[in-house]
Image: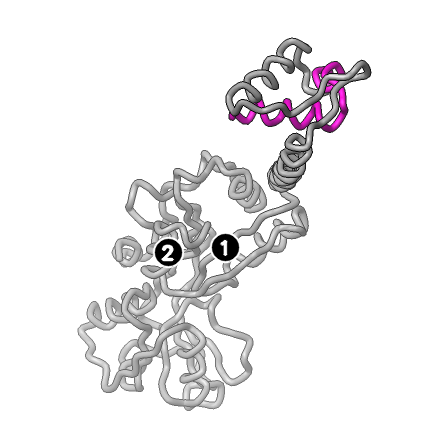
Amino acid sequence: MTSAQLKAFYAVARFGSFTIAAARMGLSQPAVSDHIKKLEEAYGVALFTRVAKGAKLTELGTKLFAIAERQAETELEAITLLSQARKLEEGALTIGADAAVHIMPHVQRFRARHPRITIKFVSGNSADLVTKLKDYQIDFAVVAAKPTDGSVEALLLGAERIVACVAADSPFANKKSLSLGQFARETVILREQGSITRNITLDALQSAKIVPVNVIEAEGRETVQELVAQKLGIALVSKAEVSNDPRVMALNISDYNVQMSEWLICLKARLNLRLLHAFLVAVQVPPNSLAKQPIKLDSPNVQQQKRK
């Protein structure tokens, strides 16, 4: 039995007429009759009794019609779902970000255009998010370093200066800045392995030939800032990532002027998907002209940071 034969059977059974069924299906009446004939011959059964006014279902035909009707409803449901997805009235996007602040304005713009699309956020450091992207666990990732992998396209969202995150009532509260030496004499809070912020902190200290007095390792940006708020140490972070928590504040590093880039990345193989394309439109960059060059900054250390 072919799909075309079952559809022809369903149409004839529904309308009780070969002529009407053929017209509704856009086929000739002989074509519809041939589908029914081959179906009946293949199983040695009679599905219709031909009558003067059309066709009447046999007992077996009535049972088959109930099955065919369920299939037709399933097919209609599938068509409706796909049609809604095509119109961006159905679907979901998963975005991975260590700091969602960088992508939030674009998400708001996308939501304004497509309010019925579900948005899910997944957290993780840059290395974790790249892995999840390549495993198709997320659609987009916001990371602090542009991947060199040819399977990934990257759009530069912006860059922020690296600052020291300190407690608002710490001894540094009345200062405008502090040096790397002062930073290293405090307890230094480091992110987990795979974090670009961790790499930046270690590179900064190594470049200045400074060994920190004490180190605490913490997983996740929120944990780092909570440790700072509790006066358990200080950390280097992107300025945009310093929260509005009144217990913490940002200070410039007087002898370290580096900016950290934020990239929106996705798999090249998925750029033609309507939903991903619509999100890129909301970010206001055509999907086939995503940024391919890192931002040019004055500091000679920047290119080194971006290769991490």
Identified at 77% across, 17% down, the residue is 51
Distance from the alpha carbon under mark 1 to that under mark 2? 11 Å
Tell me which amino acid carries mark 1. Answer: Thr
Residue 251 drawn at (x, y percent): 43, 76
Pick whichever of labels 1 and 2 is earlier in the sequence. Answer: 1
Q: Which residue is mark 2?
A: 132
In-front residue for pair 223/136:
136
State the residue lying farthest toward the left. Answer: 209
Residue 206 drawn above or below residue 116:
below
Res. 264 visible in picture:
yes
Q: Is residue 39 left or right of residue 306?
A: right
In-front residue for pair 10/85:
10
Tell me which amino acid carries mark 2. Answer: Lys
Identified at 36% across, 75% down, the residue is 219
Number of residues whose C-alpha sits closer than 10 Å to that of mark 2, classed few (under 14), some (14–19) or many (20 or more): some
Q: Secondary structure at mark 1?
A: strand
Q: Which residues are magenta?
A: 1-23
Q: Is residue 278 left or right of residue 271?
A: right
Q: Quadrant of residue 71?
A: top right
- Answer whether residue 7 is magenta in the image: yes
Q: Is residue 173 left or right of residue 203?
A: right
The majority secondary structure of the magenta stretch comes to helix
- The circle on residue 94 is 1
State the residue lying farthest toward the right. Answer: 53
Residue 170 drawn at (x, y percent): 43, 89
Residue 41 drawn at (x, y percent): 54, 18
In-front residue for pair 110/157:
110
In-front residue for pair 162/144:
144
- The circle on residue 61 is none
